[in-house]
Image: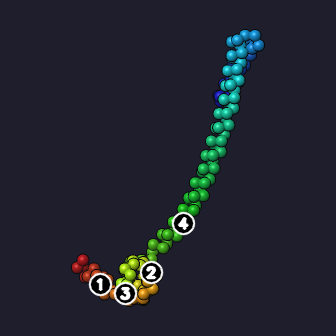
Amino acid sequence: MTISEKVAYLKGLADGLAIDTEKSKEGKLIHEIIGILEEIGYSIEDLEEATVSLGEEIDAVSDDLSDVEDAVFDDDEEDEDDDFFTVECPTCGKDLVVDEDTLAEGVVQCPGCGDTFALDLSDVEDEEEDDEDGKN
């Protein structure tokens, strides 16, 4: 039984008692209390409907956000297949991020100072050989 139904039941009980709401102080009080309860019941029903509606809207937004996350983060997972390396510009000292292709070319131009420099891969190749031989 909803609150509105309960209030309607109380209103019916009060009407059945045939309380004089015009002359009796108690009758006036009971009549006003039932009126207020009726308004409260309608307000609560409106709030319950709004809550259900908001819940549905939140579910829809959550589903949309999930779709966006899938689209954004799935692309990032594909990009993780590429290896990136950090090298330091010998002129200005700025750290640069280069991919495998740029690293294979062996030449990098620093966007900070504009200097072009060759990459020294001898240390990296020595480490790879040591790893293959089992020394590291």
Identify which amino acid the numbered label 2 is placed on. Answer: Gly
- Observer-side mark, 1 or 3, equals 3
Number of numbered discs on residues: 4
First of labels 4, 2 by sequence position: 4
- Which mark is first along the chain, 2 or 3? 2
- Mark 2 or 1: in front is 2
Instruction: State the CA–CA distance, disc 2 to disc 1.
Output: 25 Å
Labels 4, 2: front one = 2
**CA separation in Å, label 4 and label 2:** 30 Å
Q: CA distance from mark 4 to mark 3?
A: 33 Å
* Quadrant assignment for the C terminus: bottom left
Residue position marked by numbered label 3 in the rendering: 119
SS at mark 1 in the image:
helix
Identify the residue shown where x is 60% and y is 50%: 58
> Residue beneath label 2, please?
112
The spot of residue 68 in percent (x, y) is 57, 62
Tell me the tag on residue 123: 1
Q: Are marks 4 and 2 in contact (CB under 8 Å)?
A: no
Q: Residues within 10 Å of mark 2 (few under 14, many from 20)?
A: few
Task: Say which element carries label 2.
Answer: loop
Residue drawn 51% across and 66% down? 73
Dot 3 amino acid type: Leu
Which is more foreground, mark 3 or mark 2? 2
The residue that mark 4 highlights is 72
Q: Residues within 10 Å of mark 4 (few under 14, many from 20)?
A: few
Q: Determine whether 28 is above or below 71 in the image.
A: above
